[in-house]
Image (cartoon, rainbow, N blue to C red):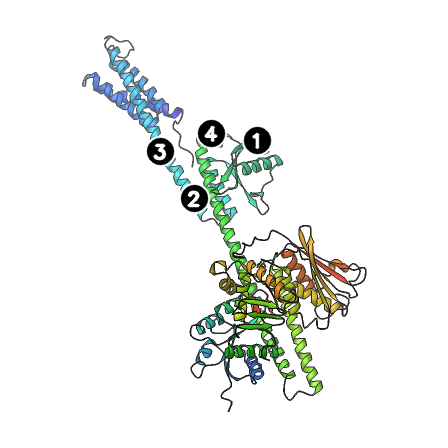
Amino acid sequence: MSEPKPSRGMGDYFRAALACVATTLLTLPLHGVVDAANIVMIFLLVVALVAVWLGSGPAILAAFGGVALFDFFFVEPRFSMAVADAQYLITFAVMLVVALVIGQLAARLREKALLATRREDEMRALYDMAKLLSGAVAAEQVADIVRDFLGSRMEIDAVLYLPRGDDALTAIPARQGGDQQQAHVRAVYEQGQPMPLAAEESGFAPALALPLVSSVRTRGVLLVFSEHAERFCAAEKRPLLDAVASLTAIAVERLHYGEVVQEVTLGMESERLRTALLSAVSHDLRTPLTVLVGLADALTLARPSLPPSAFESAVAIRDQALCLSGLVHNLLDMARLHTGKIVLNREWQPLEEVVGSSLKAMAGVLVGREVHVELAPDLPPLEFDAVLLERVFCNLLENAAKYAPKGEILITAQVAGDVAEVAVVDAGPGLPPDGEESVFDLFERGRHSGAGGGLGLAICRAIVEAHGGRIRAERRAEGGTRIVFTLPLGTPPVLEEEAGE
Amino acid sequence: MNDDRPLILVVEDEPQIRRFVRAALEDEGRVVEASSAAGALEAFTGPGPALAIIDLGLPDRDGVELIRELRTWTMLPLLVLSARSAEAEKVAALDAGADDYLTKPFGVQEMRARVRALLRRQKVGAGGTVIEFGNIRVDRAHRTVTRDGAAIHLTPIEYRLLGVLLTKAGRVLTHRQLLKDVWGPGYAERGHYLRIYIGHLRQKLEADPARPRYLLTETGIGYRFQIQDYAT
């Protein structure tokens, strides 16, 4: 579809001339029958019609031509430009002025009508494009629709640049652009202002980079280009180009939000699945383990009591079932911690409390062991998840009990700079050389491996790191292992003074 | 012939768990079983049970909801069975009115001890005006606390906190319940107040505050005042 033009070149002037000649031929027989003034009227009518149909230029030609022909064929002496009666000069002058004025007015009217038609046409085309864009589901489709529109309406080519992943702008359809062009597109993307590019800058043709500005941010860049720069540079083209850019921005933004929604839905779905799986596994394992522990325990308490060998078996079954249960819990904890989405229930509390509850929880494992607790008196309350930190202490105490079968266990804590440093120390054989770091890796075991070691330390690391702390293992010079972890001190909340104290 | 023994209701959907719980509690009372919340409510149509053990993972209804409903018309002791790493569930059950909880898997002796404590409390209530534990003596009539005969000064809040814990001795009290009872409803979210004041009480009352014998922490849930060797 080519754009309608207000003036159609020499053809129209020829047609205007033809109209004047035809009018003369048709009115010649009327000479002497009607008054010359009426002939003048006919000529004026023709000028008006020429103006409406052919535009202002041909109308001017028709005005002059009309006056000349009228003089030549209808004014005495006929068939000569000479004028016998001088008052016809007034007729000519009035005729010419009226013809010119009518012609110009009519021509302007026509141009306005043409412009309105063109605008309406543009609007319809934009509307059609918007409708197509609203159905687009991929960036490639958006690019195709925009390129079709610009190609057919303005005979220019275009490329869409959209940020992908790491915010790098990717061309759709893919094309090799020079570095300079990339830099320009980037600048337009960042500044949100359109920028023209000369042919040497773009590397192939004069171009114009338009930012795709949406309500929130710049969503990309539309680069239009053509060998004929005037096709997009002319001022009257800009409103259309701006409209195209806005529509494209809306379409790209819609696609973006669509992707976001999809990602969130996917994330929620996989999170839901994981949680469902974990709780199903933990329920299915817990029930038989609870039964096993309970039944074996009931056997050990049966009256009359079992014969010694059966009693020992019952105790062993109970202890192994408890051990298995601990392992299952560790695995489930690890799975939960490894999803990376642990919600810490952090609260300000004294460390002493969680040390005490851990010692109580591990009383069975620590039977016959001496455990010393040395917490610095100036240790402020810390912000941590008590349940998880209890897991850390329990795992460290269990490890100490397991890998250092004798000697005392020491728990210390003090302020060290802007962290609290907590240590669990045993007097066991110590770590293997170079084992200081790997001991925290998943499924790593100490030399005296028991059932499912290692996992406990990996859990400790995950929990401590989730609290913003670090954990490390040290070989003690005097023998034994010292596992140290830190917790950030932060600023404890201020307690209101107790009234009436 | 054993009709005077207390009736213990066990609400648990897993038959094997019911089996060993029943076997373990034969000495404590008569056991009736229910495998669902509906069955549990039915068990109250006859002579009411003296204690109920409720698994929180029931097939037909949320265990916490069942507790809430029971609490609208009965004060019988409720012992809850729940999984580890389900602290929120336990807190919800306790806040709804449960008295104590056991984490699966649990030993028979521990369960017996809890059941006995709950049944006993039902009988005798929460002691007289003078309560003694370890070397501490609390005289609630005169509002004095002594340690080996020497007076210990407690601030009003410390005394109130100790009072609440003593009144509900043996019972697990959630952070929320304690904050509400001692500080008032506006303080339900200020867990650090409670922890700091429990720390103060331990400093004043416990021989080794890091390893308390009486003021026990139920990590992630709340506190329990444990009176050991109480009538046994």
Q: CA distance from mark 2 to mark 4?
A: 24 Å
The residue shown at (38%, 35%) is A119
Can residue A282 be seen?
Answer: yes
Extreme residue in the bottom direction: B1
Q: Are marks 3 and 4 in contact (CB under 8 Å)?
A: no
Q: Earlier along the polypeptide chain: callout 1 or callout 2?
A: 2
Residue type, numbered disc 4: Ala
Could you tell me which quadrant the C terminus of chain A lies in?
Answer: bottom right
Mark 2 belongs to which subunit?
A
Q: Which residue is mark 3?
A: A116
Q: Mark 3 vs mark 4: tell me if same chain.
A: yes
Front residue of A400/B38: it is A400
Label placed on residue A130 = 2
Dot 2 or dot 3: first in sequence order is 3
Earlier-in-chain disc, 3 versus 1: 3
Q: Amino acid at mark 3?
A: Ala
Mark 4 surroundings within 10 Å by alpha-carbon count, few (fewer than 14), some (14 through 19), many (20 or more)? few
Position above or below: A98 against A372? above
In this orientation, which residue lies closer to the viewer: A137 or B103? B103
Residue labelled with disc 1: A199
Q: Nearer the viewer, mark 2 or mark 3?
A: 2
Circle number at residue A234: 4
Quarter residue A355 falls in: bottom right
